[in-house]
Image (cartoon, rainbow, N blue to C red):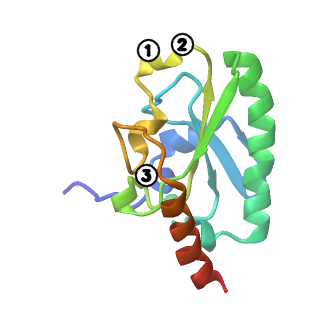
């Protein structure tokens, strides 16, 4: 019988062995399906799914690796910009239930090779007309109500 994998990052040794850099609480490794060259992931050592499951120290550890990787990725891939993202929940595309921050070094022309287009991930793909100011203010008010 084939063992069912709950978390690829914890249970597949090849992924841990792929580590680029680590500190006490987090480690970084290249994703097996990069959307641009140099696409890496940073994950906490502890297996937790959501950002709010992370301790303050784990968040610091993750952002510390981000700082280091930004410098290295800029040199190695001549990055001119970066995308940082995490998917939360199955519906949002989180395929591994272990928090991971995506880091994508970007440079002019890479979209042609990878077809990576951030706008395709937005809630309103296709037409990119500006939303009327009144609608944006209504959205602000709705969210503010829950914050107060
Ligand atoms: Zn895990």
Distance from disc 1 to disc 2, alpha carbons, whole Å, reads 8 Å
Q: Residue at label 1?
A: 113
Seen in the picture, residue 100 relative to 68 is either above or below; the reply is below
Q: Which residue is mark 3?
A: 8
Q: Which mark is residue 66?
A: none
In this rendering, which labeled residue sits more in front, label 1 or label 2?
2
In the rendered image, residue 15, in percent from the top left (x then y), is placed at: 51, 41
**Mark 3 lies within 8 Å of ligand 1 (Cβ measured):** yes
Residue under the point 80% across and 29% down: 71
Q: In the rendering, at what x and y percent does residue 50 appear?
A: 54, 67
Q: Quadrant of residue 16?
A: top right
Q: Secondary structure at mark 1?
A: helix
Q: Which mark is residue 109?
A: 2
Residue 73 position by quadrant: top right
Horizontal relation, residue 31 to residue 123: left or right: right
Front of the two marks 3 and 2: 2
């Amino acid at each position: 019988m084939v063992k069912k994998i709950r978390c690829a990052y914890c249970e597949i040794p090849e992924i841990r062995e792929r580590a680029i850099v680590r500190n006490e609480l987090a480690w970084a490794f290249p994703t097996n399906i990069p959307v641009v060259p140099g696409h890496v992931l940073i994950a906490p050592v502890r297996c937790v799914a959501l950002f709010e499951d992370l301790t303050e120290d784990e968040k610091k550890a993750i952002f510390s690796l981000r700082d280091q990787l930004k410098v290295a990725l800029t040199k190695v891939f001549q990055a001119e910009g970066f995308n940082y993202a995490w998917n939360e929940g199955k519906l949002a595309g989180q395929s591994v239930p272990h928090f991971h921050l995506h880091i994508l070094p970007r440079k002019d022309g890479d979209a042609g090779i990878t077809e990576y287009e951030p706008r395709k991930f937005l809630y309103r793909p296709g037409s990119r007309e500006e939303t009327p100011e009144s609608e944006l203010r209504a959205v602000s008010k709705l969210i503010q109500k829950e914050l107060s």
